[in-house]
C-alpha cells in the first residue's frame, strides 16, 4: 500500500514570509496532484504534475516534482492570509486518488 | 447550486444505529468516491465506483457499504455505527483527472 507523508504537519507563519511544504511517497507516483482545502469546504485542485523534474508555477505557488517521482514540494512566496488552509498531495494514478496526511498552514496578518 | 451535494451536512447519532450519507452530482461524471477525513490522517478512501455496475473497496472499507443507485447518486452506509467512525466524510467525482468534492458530511457517533 502506497503511503504519502507530508511535512511539516502544521505551519504558522507571518504574512509576507516564504515557506515550503513537502510530500514523500513510499513508491513512485503515477501522477501527483496538490489540493488546498479551506475550512468548511472540500479540497480544490491546485496542480497536476506528471514528469519527473517538472516545475509548475501558479502565481506565488511553485510546485516541484522530484526527478525520481517519489517526492514533491510546494513553495509559497510572500504568503498571504488567503493562503491559509490544508494542503494535500495525492497520487491520481489509475483514478484511485490516494492522499497524503496533509500540511495545515496558517498565515497570520 | 453545488455540483456535488452531500446530505446531511451534520449528523449526531448513537452507537449501533444505521446511518446513510447521500451524495448526488450534476457534473455527469462516471467516477464517484467516498473519503473519510480525520485530523492528521488526510483523506482516506472508503469506496469508489467507476460506473453504476463497478464498485470497489478502498483503503478502509470495513464497517461501511455503498450503493450506486444511478450515475448521479452514490450513497454510503454505516450499518451499525461506532464511535471511531466519528469523522468528516467527503463525496467526490472525477472524469478527466481532477477530483471535485462536496462540502462534506460531519458525523458524530456517541
Image: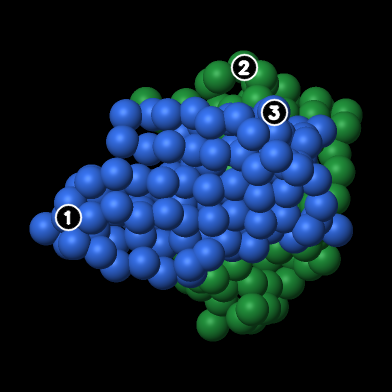
Give the chain letter at badge 1: A
Q: Mark on residue A51? A: 3
Residues A13 and B36: in front is A13
Q: Which residue, given by chain and number where applicable, does mark 2 sit on?
A: B28
Up the image or down, A93 lies above or below A17; here it is above
> How much space separates mark 2 and mark 1, taking CA atoms?
40 Å
Instruction: Provide residue B109's location: percent of width, then percent of height.
Output: 56, 76
Q: Which residue, given by chain and number where applicable, does mark 1 sit on?
A: A15
Image point 65% across, 25% down: which residue?
B97
Up the image or down, B21 lies above or below A13; here it is above
Instruction: Provide residue A56's location: percent of width, then percent of height.
Output: 49, 28
Letter of the green chain? B
Letter of the blue chain? A
Left or right of residue A93, residue A6 in this image:
left
In the rendered structure, are the residues bearing label 2 and label 3 in contact, judged by CB atoms less than 8 Å apart? no
Within 10 Å of disc 2 (Cα), the crowding (few <14, some 14-19, many 20+) is few
Q: Quadrant of the C terminus of chain A?
A: bottom left
> How much space separates mark 2 and mark 3, taking CA atoms?
29 Å
Please, what secondary structure does the residue beneath circle 3 have?
A: loop
Image point 70% across, 34% down: which residue?
A52
Residues A100 and B50: in front is A100
Amino acid at each position: 500500500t502506497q503511503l504519502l507523508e507530508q511535512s511539516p504537519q502544521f505551519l504558522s507563519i507571518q504574512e509576507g514570509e516564504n515557506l515550503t511544504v513537502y510530500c514523500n511517497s513510499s513508491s513512485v507516483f503515477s501522477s501527483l496532484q496538490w489540493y488546498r482545502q479551506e475550512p468548511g469546504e472540500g479540497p480544490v485542485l491546485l496542480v497536476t504534475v506528471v514528469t519527473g523534474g517538472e516545475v509548475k508555477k501558479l502565481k506565488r505557488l511553485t510546485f516541484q516534482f522530484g526527478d525520481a517521482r517519489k517526492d514533491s514540494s510546494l513553495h509559497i512566496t510572500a504568503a498571504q492570509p488567503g493562503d491559509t488552509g490544508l494542503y494535500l498531495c495525492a497520487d491520481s494514478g489509475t483514478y484511485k486518488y490516494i492522499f497524503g496526511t496533509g500540511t495545515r498552514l496558517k498565515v497570520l496578518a | 447550486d453545488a455540483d456535488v451535494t452531500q446530505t446531511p451536512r451534520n449528523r449526531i447519532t448513537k452507537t449501533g444505529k444505521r446511518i446513510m450519507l447521500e451524495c448526488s452530482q450534476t457534473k455527469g461524471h462516471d467516477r464517484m468516491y467516498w473519503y473519510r477525513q480525520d485530523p492528521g490522517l488526510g483523506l482516506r478512501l472508503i469506496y469508489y465506483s467507476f460506473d453504476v455496475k463497478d464498485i470497489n473497496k478502498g483503503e478502509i472499507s470495513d464497517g461501511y457499504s455503498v450503493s450506486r443507485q444511478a450515475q448521479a447518486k452514490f450513497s454510503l452506509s454505516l450499518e451499525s455505527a461506532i464511535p471511531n467512525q466519528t469523522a468528516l466524510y467527503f463525496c467526490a467525482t472525477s472524469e478527466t483527472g481532477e477530483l471535485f468534492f462536496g462540502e462534506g458530511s460531519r458525523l458524530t457517533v456517541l
